[in-house]
Image: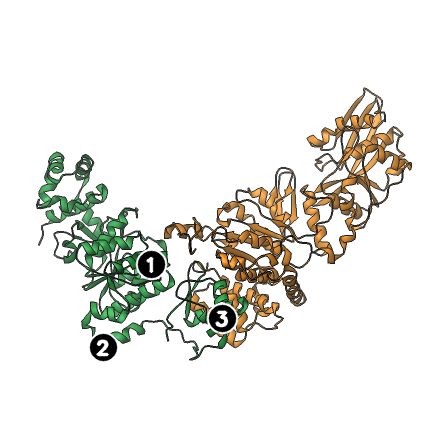
Chain colours: A orange, B green
Amino acid sequence: MTVCRARSLALFGIDALPVEVEVDVSAGLPGFSIVGLPDAAVQEARERVRVAISNSGFKFPTRKVIVNLAPANLRKEGAAFDLPIALGILAVSGEVPPERLDGLAAVGELSLDGDLRGTRGALSMSEGAFTEGIPTILLPASNAREAAATGKVEVFGTKSLRESVEFLRGEVELRAAEPEDGANEGAFDVFADDFADVSGQGYAKRALEVAASGGHNLLMSGPPGSGKTMLARRLPGILPPLSLSESIEATKVHSAAGEGNGSLLRERPFRAPHHTISTSGLAGGRSSPRPGEVSLAHHGVLFLDEFPEFSRTALEVLRQPLEDGHVTISRVAATLSYPARVTLVCSMNPCPCGYSGDKRRRCRCSAGQIERYQSRISGPLLDRIDLFVDVPRLTRDELRGEGRAESSAMIRERVASARAVQTARQGVPNSALAGRRLREICALGDDSEALLSHAIDRMGLSGRAHDRVLRVARTIADLVGEESIAVEHLAESLNYRRSSLADG
Amino acid sequence: MPTAEERGAWLFFSLLQARAGTSLVTRLGNIPPSEAMGMPPERFAAATGCGEKVSSHFAQMRRDFRPSEVVGMLSEKGVAVVTFADDGYPARLREMSDPPPALFVDGGIPDGPYVAVVGSRKASPGGLDAAERIGRALGGRGVCVVSGLALGVDGAAHRGAVSVAGKTLGVLGCGIDIVYPKKHHALFDEVRRGGAIVSEYYLGEAPLAWHFPARNRIVAGMCETVVVVEAAEKSGALITARHALDAGRDVWAIPGPTSMPECRGSNKLLADGAGVLWDVDEFVESVAPDGGTASAASETSGVSEIPFEVPAELPAGEAAALSGVGFEPAGVDVISARSGVGVGELLSALTMLELKGYVSRDSGGGFVRKAARR
């Protein structure tokens, strides 16, 4: 028998699909070819595998070697098939017992001296192996911890081709990687940025607390240097702790983008892309798709600083993820989707020069310029933003403050209990309420109803703003554990409307 | 009555003035316009002291100018034209040093007296409120409120006048068929109904930056009195005030907080001797003394008051919050520090106060105190 099979996995979105590596060595002119829709990186595996095998002290067959990657219709990319190809070849030449390759998936990129390099998507691969019924996965040591996080399959990390071969021959023992002990949920609360360090800005902090509690998207407006970015950075720290399943999902996205650090993500991600970002940078894409910023912020915070400067098309692509919680990318090769459930935080200056309404610096913009600047952010995306808050620049006295403020941990406790109320009542955060359910869940008493209709007349609120006010009022009531929305909750909610323009 | 030829000539000079950007009425002096129009370009330039650019425009535009076509086009659009030769030309405007050769009018120019209310486009809520109240009070007295239909104070003054069905006149820096700023679309219609929109620029002329200072001389020229509500140190409102002073008109200004850049110009006017507008009723009484007893009622009757329970005494929380709100805009955090009310509670108290009309909110999210309307 001259055909040997090794199994491997190919990353597709954040899922891994099984790939069978078939190796045939037959008589004929010495040669090495790979078939089965390989891309350039896979084609180059020929040279890497050949050299790595010889440099590991084995003999590369001097016959005709054909490698087939099945299924043949799936496009394979990347260098992660190096290891299974090498193992398949060595199985044919008798260095590795072929039966040891059953029930095992191998993934990894070879270097010329036979060492293994890390690969992206390790966690997705181990999940993929589990769904395929493959009990064991062999991959580079640097990825082992991440891949073991699910605890569903046996994960062996190996440093080199030589070590893998010896392991398969049973000459050395490898220890299966353990799931991280940090996988229990309490440990997921280490944050460098704490609200305790922020003195003043009570208004913005309160708004962020409400945003975190109801999963509301938020827009901060204020002059440069007022601390918008600093405040936004602290939002992940007051969101409810990442659950294990959320952490696994977020890690899979990061790993698929090649941004994983080899272990589970413990902090809620905070992504702050620059405003020159392209559509595919934000949503994900490229010819071989990678997750974009909105997916990398999955279960965390996507912060768009200088919101009006983002291109309109880039912002348009945010509409689907904000609505559905995932982003779908269609390319010639395939259509795939990445998860993208984020809390969106935007910041902007009140006018092009930034100093409108500032006490100490004179604004140099004309009324027309300000109107044009602000009208740039009108549009459908704005409908998804529930809270609008003005962040003024603080004076020196206020900055010095009255000592340490409330810590993020204390705020997070209130947020978590408000979230728990929402989950028990409707299964989703308040920000996702719409239509009839919104009316039912946010029913108002007579007093509140009178206040709201008065406010609509007096403040010129639109229908959209009406829903927004209700959702936010519901969250404020949940924060204090009230069952019905009282007048003061509604009144506070009315304060988070867009201040500068008539509400759009 | 002016001859058609004379009117046509003024119309021609109006178009030429807009193109060349030089004041031709002054330059023409005593030369009859129809005669000047017939001159060869070189002689026209010599007689009026214009440069080469103006005389080449003169030659080119005269070739294409058909007065009957222009007048026909205007009447088709329902736009009247009042030339310098017409009896309907505002008498006070004639006294200015640089009157426009013709005015295009949409609506009917109301009878006087005329009072201009001008100020910043980025006025504070207090300023907007004052402008609207003045507009309302003047409108209720039968005084025609003149302003520039711009954002901010101008718009508020017009709005005040139309809210009591008073007379009002909007002077534009663009053709009168152009709505600028676009936001004032509805207000344009209301002003047209309550009086007229006029402009020295022909239909379709764009709102170019240099038109606005020129427009201000018409605002000042139309009126006996000019009120400056809020004006920064370099602002169009101050240009209007200067034109008014040059022509010997009365200038009033509303005192504003010292630290607000938007009030420095108007405060400076006060220091230079402008009339101090400290009380709207007193001001209206001094501009239009014959109003009699009806005035007090008219000021309040126009307020569109929505019935809402305003308790005689504010609840304790709201009263405490109000104590932290001053006459200069302050952010929520400042108010919280001043009043000692926590942010969450304060936010809801401020909304209640806003709805009750005790405070208002400016574009930067700052709150200011406001006289409650009951």
Residue named by callout 3: B349
Question: In the rendered structure, which amino acid carries the disc numbered 1?
Answer: Cys
**A437 or A138: nearer the eye?**
A138
Dot 3 amino acid type: Ala
Residue type pointed to by label 2: Thr
Single out the residue that lies furthest toward the top.
A29
Q: Is residue B239 above or below residue B139?
A: above
The x, y position of residue B366, in whole percent, is 44, 62
Q: Which sits earlier in the primary sequence, circle 1 or circle 2?
A: 1
Q: Quadrant of residue B367?
A: bottom left
Along the line of sight, the residue nearer the viewer: A234 or A347: A234
Chain label for disc 2: B
Circle 1 Cα neighbour tier, 10 Å, few/some/many (<14 / 14–19 / ≥20): many
Secondary structure at badge 2 equals loop
- In the picture of the structure, the residue carrying the numbered disc 1 is B263
Can you say which quadrant of the picture contains the N terminus of chain A?
top right
Residue B198 in view (yes/no): no
Q: Earlier in the sequence, mark 1 or mark 3?
A: 1
First in residue order: circle 2 vs circle 3: 2
Q: Nearer the viewer, mark 2 or mark 3?
A: 3
Tell me which chain the residue with mark 3 is part of: B
As displayed, is residue B205 above or below residue B40? below
Give how far apart the Cα atoms at labels 2 and 3 are: 39 Å
Dot 3: element: helix
Chain where mark 1 sits = B
Q: CA distance from mark 1 to mark 2?
A: 33 Å
* 1 vs 3, front mark: 1
Residue at 41%, 71% (x, y): give it.
Answer: B358
Secondary structure found at label 1: helix
Residue placed under numbered mark 2 in the picture: B293
Determine if marks 1 and 3 fall on one subunit.
yes
Q: Position of residue A215 (x, y in %)?
A: 60, 59
